Image: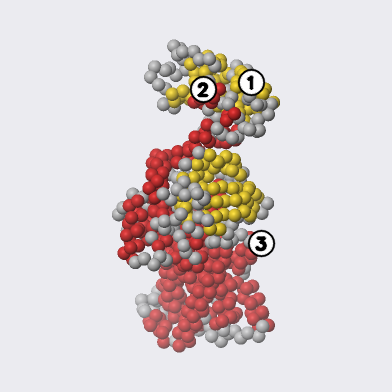
Amino acid sequence: MTALIDLKNVNKYYGDYHALRDVSLEIAQGEFFSLLGPSGCGKTTLLRTIAGFEDPSDGTLHIAGADMNGVPANARPTNMVFQSYAIFPHLTVAENVGFGLRKSPSSKTDKMKSVEEALEMVGLKGFGGRAAHALSGGQRQRVALARALILKPKVLLLDEPLSALDKKLREQMQSELRRLQRQVGITFILVTHDQEEALIMSDRVAVMFEGEIAQLADPQTLYKRPLSRKVGDFIGVMNFLPAAVRNATAIELDVAGLGPVTIAPDQAPSTAKTGPAEVGIRPEMMSILFEGEPDRETIAEGIIKDRAYYGDMTYYDVHLKNVDQPITISMKNIIGRPVLDIGDTARVSWDARSLVLFSD
Amino acid sequence: MKSLRTYAILYLIFLYAPIALLPIFAFNDATIIAFPLSGFTTQWFTELPQIPALIDSVKNSLYIAVITAILSTLLGICAARAAAKYTFRFKRPIMGFIMVPLVLPEIIVAVSLLVILLQLGLSLGAGTVIMGHVLICTPFCIAILNSAFQNLDPAMEEAAIDLGETPWSTFRLVTLPLVSPAIISALLISFTISLDEFIIAFFLTGTEPTLPVYLWSQLRFPARIPVVMALGTILVAGSILLLILAEMMRRRGLRRAGLQDKGGFL
């Protein structure tokens, strides 16, 4: 199957500023795809390039097999939900949603019917007659969605659509967007700086830094096996420990605080060499052993420097022996497990399978 | 605090007392402008339409004001739109020079225009007054329209294009409706400025005086002064009405776009 969207070696310059660096990307029909990165990483520029609001300086873009070079935004099979929603304030909700149908040859009753359907799809049935400027943030977002989906585009582009909503509403919209995408089967491309949002919603995520795609993977791979320290640091929380690679083929290393370890090839980059390196480990991949819990093989000793109680979880900063930086360990607050105090000694158990080696 | 309030009140009296005298003497039953008032009359107002030269000057002024309002608003739309949407070399100095006539002494503008127009061999008349008025009204229009275009979310136009509209239909369907209150406000303000303007009109008007120029010429005849007062009263009332209308349009525009009011002319 050929990709629905196919970008090859796309570059974008603004004067001397290199906004997109040699981006190549294939996105399949029906995929929920996210572009994730900090502000200024080029993710919005990439989205706007697909929409036709920016022209790539070089490289090619195909949508559904058609070359998009020279095709203006109003002729592309894409529609966009803008960060500000861009709801036309001088029109009613129904006029906003039906805006894209203005040039369609179908009859007025057919158009009204599709507006009604679109509004029902986003849960705004009966809102058609309202003035658009009187809507709440969440309602605007739904109107923007209905307006973009009414033309049945091949690709729906979403530019940080949830960033203006409060936490509760955002979480609700995340699952609604996901449900809607499954329902309509249209390819969604979401731009976000929120790594959690990208992990929750996407089939695949492209992590971007400084105009480049640093890693493109499904959420689980991205979280478990980040390809670089930067990606590991950006997605969730990750502890980094200095290490020395003794044998690059069998992948034997000495990790500060943890001791000698052997890891599997998929935990290390193919370019791993002997010498100094770094390993990453997630806070929940280590645990503090409490009294009465059985001993494990791999144990490190440490002292609790700080703790943060989150209700369901407690995050501890633990100083391991012979390690300068404290590491973060998260523990679920299950029945019978005490919350430790600052200054307590902690026996930390860990597993070699949860380590990731970085050579950058 | 107290002295500040006294100052403000004195200042307002200084500013508006002469204007307040206009209607008082316009309804006073005497040809001499002095207290005590001798009685109430509407005679001066009924005399107004019986002076043909006056009627001609009103027609002339209205014609000039309408054309000036349309031209300077059109120029203002182009400039404000360009300033909001594009970045180009020397943008700041260009915008600055366009705005300069706002503070340039009108007598300087009038004299230099007169010299140039005569050098070019153009005959003075309504056309030359319009030129001068467009020059001083355009900066006001730009100032009003600029904030409307700057407040316009660029995503609005992009959204319309994304939904299949051409750049022109986008301008017509989205941009214009959203800035239309500012356009009406600019039309009204430039109309008012042109209607009231004296110095440029005085220099460039030729043989067909505008209303302010006619009024000035009548001041030489003491008997006519109450009539001038009556006319002045109508002019002041009309100007205030137009400015209130313009400000209402500006606020309506902000509400429509769902924006906070951040000042304005009134």
Confirm whether circles 2 and 3 share one chain: no
Question: Which SS class for mark 1?
Answer: strand
Q: Position of residue B199 (x, y in %)?
A: 58, 75
* Residue type beneath disc 2: Met
Q: Residue furthest right?
A: A275
The residue that disc 1 covers is A254
Decide which of A34, B129 is in the foreground and name it.
A34
The residue that disc 2 covers is A286
Q: Residue at x 60, y 22 (%)?
A: A262
If you read the primary sequence from the N terminus, does the residue marked by circle 2 or circle 1 appear first? 1
Residue A162, picture quadrant:
top left
Q: Position of residue B200 (x, y in %)?
A: 58, 76
Confirm whether circles 3 and 1 share one chain: no
Mark nearest the camera among 2 and 1 is 1
Mark nearest the camera among 2 and 3 is 2
The residue that disc 3 covers is B90
Mark 1 falls within which chain?
A
* Residue type beneath disc 1: Asp
**The C terminus of chain A lies in quadrant:** top right
Disc ID at residue A285: none
Q: Position of residue B28 (x, y in %)?
A: 40, 76
Q: Residue at x 63, y 77 (%)?
A: B113
